[in-house]
Image: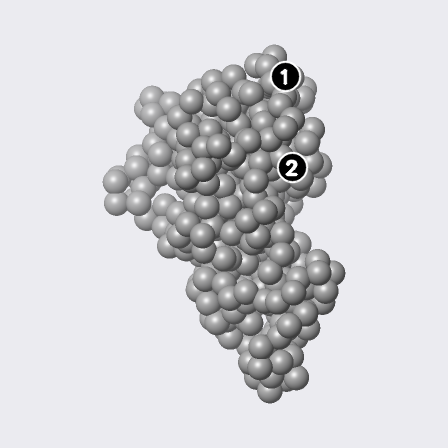
Amino acid sequence: MYLTREEERMLKGEYGYAAQKAMEILVALGKIYEADRMIEIKSAQISGVSYKNIGEEGLEFLLELAEDGRVRVPTTLNPCGMDLENWRKMEVPEDFADKQLKVIEAYRKLGIKLTLTCTPYLAGNLPRFGDHLAWSESSAVIYANSVIGARTNREGGPSALAAAIAGRTPLHGLHLSENRAPTIEILAPELREEYEFAALGFLVGKRFGDSVPLFRGLGAPSRDHLKALGAGLASGGGVALFHVEGVTPEIVRDPGLAADERVEIELRELREVIEEFSDDFEEPDLVFIGCPHASIEEITAFYEALRGRRVKRRTWIFASRAVRDQAESLGLKRKLEELGAEIICDTCPIVAPIRSMGIRSVATNSAKAAYFSRNLNKLKVKLESIEELAEEAVK
């Protein structure tokens, strides 16, 4: 793999330990994927932030990098294991909080913006069409590729961090135009509810693995519909890019793009996915939206669905601080709190130590959250619409 003079100097350690370690990781990945060179990136998004996920070894690695490391490009951070301001209110154990704060401090020393969200595009890290990125967090990756038209592979936490420190990533995969064409066409029913888009994504991801689907027949889905569709695709399979006819930028610019294989998805099949995520329990310990983190439109929709009724069980809305601040400026945060619902920042139920909080069952509108709550956190789940979640919260 060809390296520039500057890249060679980083690899030799002339820029310090962190830059050398970053280049070692990137060169190794470049060889694995047969990249012929590196490409400079515009931004990075780092996962592997919750102490629950990275543990003591991950913390030690970060502390070593933070001794002399600094990111070269604007870099944002995925959710951690707790709300940094309200972790006691969340009933997070003190020993976990102590370790989590050390993780956050290491990232801060590296020069990373502490956005702590899986929707960086709603919190100031908004790429332009065609920008090359090094993003981790599967739902952020697929949104950047598909809805924005930027270019990133599905990076892991260490490779995204290495790219941020080096300011570049190996040129392969979805950075190349020839790998971004649709490989299968999906004829889908026109959908209305966000959780239906989530179910469609999960079904197609599970059935067609790491394909590049082109959806036809979806009408004009909203930004939140596309966010839910992408999160479902990325959790159901390894999908990192999709196109929607007449909507997403690459297919709008080149409407002649097509695939040889075409599959029709019926509404009945989506109902089966929703039924699959319907465990046998009466009352959830937690009702939540915001996986990926909620937009101001989703928060508004949930507030309107409550129709002034107080919630009777733990009800959390997960959002970035940027969106939380929007809700606060609109008076929406105060109104929700008066009804007993809370906006939680910096974390999500997937990466938080949820079982230590006494939670054994959840209801959500996210197929991704339902899948990982069941399979990672061993919780019982229900996948429902925002209207149904509001009813769960108040009954």
Q: Within 10 Å of the Cα at label 1, are there few (<14), some (14-19), or many (20+) other Cα atoms?
A: few
> In the picture shown, does residue 228 fall above or below 59?
above
Instruction: Please tell me the numbered disc located at residue 103.
Output: none
Where is residue 369 shown, x and y percent of the image?
59, 36
Q: Residue at x 35, y 34 (%)?
A: 297
Where is residue 249 shown, x and y percent of the image?
42, 40
Q: Residue at x 64, y 72 (%)?
A: 2
Where is residue 65 shown, x and y percent of the image?
60, 75
Which image quarter: residue 383? top right
> In the picture shown, does residue 341 fall above or below 131?
above
Badge 1 marks a residue whose secondary structure is helix
> In the picture shown, does residue 202 fall above or below 110?
above
56 on left or right of 243: right
Where is residue 386 shown, x and y percent of the image?
45, 25
Instruction: Please tell me the numbered disc located at residue 269.
Output: 1
Please tell me which of labels 2 and 1 falls first in the chain: 2
Q: Residue at x 69, y 28 (%)?
A: 207
Q: Nearer the viewer, residue 395 or 345?
A: 345
Amino acid on which the number 1 mark rests in the picture? Glu
Q: Nearer the viewer, residue 120 or 308?
A: 120
Q: Nearer the viewer, residue 197 or 289?
A: 197
**Which residue is most to the right?**
32
Which image quarter: residue 51? bottom right
